[in-house]
Amino acid sequence: MKVLVAVKRVVDYNVKVRVAADNSGVDLTNVKMAMNPFCEIAVEEAVRLKEKGVATEIVAVAVGPKEAQEQIRTALALGADRGILVEAADAQPLAVAKLLKAIVDQEKPELVIMGKQAIDGDNNQTGQMLAALAGMGQGTFASEVNVADGSVKVTREIDGGLQTVDLKLPAVVTTDLRLNEPRYASLPNIMKAKKKPLDIKSPGDFGVDVSPLVKTLKVEPPAERQAGVKVADVAELVDKLKNEAKVI
Ligand code: AMP
């Protein structure tokens, strides 16, 4: 079974991002970039399926600038077999989904594993759009994935509980936080990953127009929280709630 994994290059989750001076977006100057954490979980799940003998080949795909090769190499070091980079910076979810659909048509994977959302745009759209474009079933927010007999059972984290769905393969699964704990790449595997095949493509190779459909008007940081105060006793607390905060 071939598994396709989509990995996005985003600002490292440890970085405290700053808004650009002109409020056009996030300032990316000298900022550490990394693989989107939910995509790490997707790669880990694919590698576990390979270790169980369920998957036979893992193809890691990224749409991004040429530097996104780094994230594909990380996926290769973690256990993916080969990579495809479609060079297009700032492609929006629909454009990414169209490119992934074209790659699905070429590669014919039985399972596509993606993150539930990218921590930069917080869109939570690409997996759903790909499933719709490719006519595949979707199991989003997966916390458990079991492949057997031409289908995949996905336990989904939904509001207030868990839902288990059975999808006919080929299907799209998007990962939630509790699906697994990704491993770290070992140094020998990082070295081996340098020799694994990585194809570089352009959106034109797939006939996909990646021009933006959504325009960001303004990005603002969250309001600063005011410092708290310590009160001496309950009477002072009640007084402040009544006369300053005016909430009682
Ligand atoms: P989003 O819909 O942007 O929140 O992203 C959800 C998931 O779609 C990500 O975790 C990735 O698996 C995939 N994805 C989104 N954008 C890209 C991209 N530019 N390259 C590769 N995968 C992507």
Image: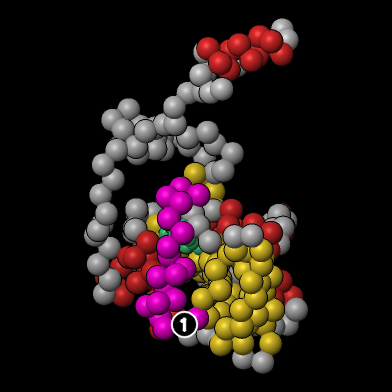
Is residue 222 found left or right of 163 in the rendered image?
Answer: left
Determine the residue positioned at 63% across, 64% down.
Answer: 157
Is residue 59 found left or right of 153 in the rendered image?
Answer: left
Residue 185 position within the rendered picture, expressed as x and y whole percent measured from the top left:
69, 56
**69 part of magenta stretch:** no
Secondary structure state at the residue bearing disc 1: loop
Name the foreground residue: 52 vs 232: 232
Decide: is 176 above or below 171: above
**131 part of magenta stretch:** yes
Say which amino acid is labelled 1.
Met
Judging by the rendered image, the residue that carries numbered circle 1 is: 136
Name the foreground residue: 187 vs 209: 209
Is residue 191 found left or right of 173 in the rendered image?
Answer: right
Residue 38 visible at all: yes
Residue 86 visible at all: no
Determine the residue positioned at 34% across, 53% down.
Answer: 90
Which quadrant of the figure has residue 169? bottom right
Which quadrant of the figure has residue 217? top left
Read off the magenta span: 119-137
Circle 1 crowding by C-alpha within 10 Å: few under 14, some 14–19, many from 20: some
Determine the residue positioned at 57% across, 83% down.
Answer: 167
Residue 10 position within the rendered picture, expressed as x and y whole percent measured from the top left:
48, 49
- For this orientation, the residue located farthest to the right is 52
What coloring was used for the rendering?
Answer: secondary structure
Q: Quadrant of the C terminus?
A: top right
Residue 77 position within the rendered picture, expressed as x and y whole percent measured from the top left:
64, 61
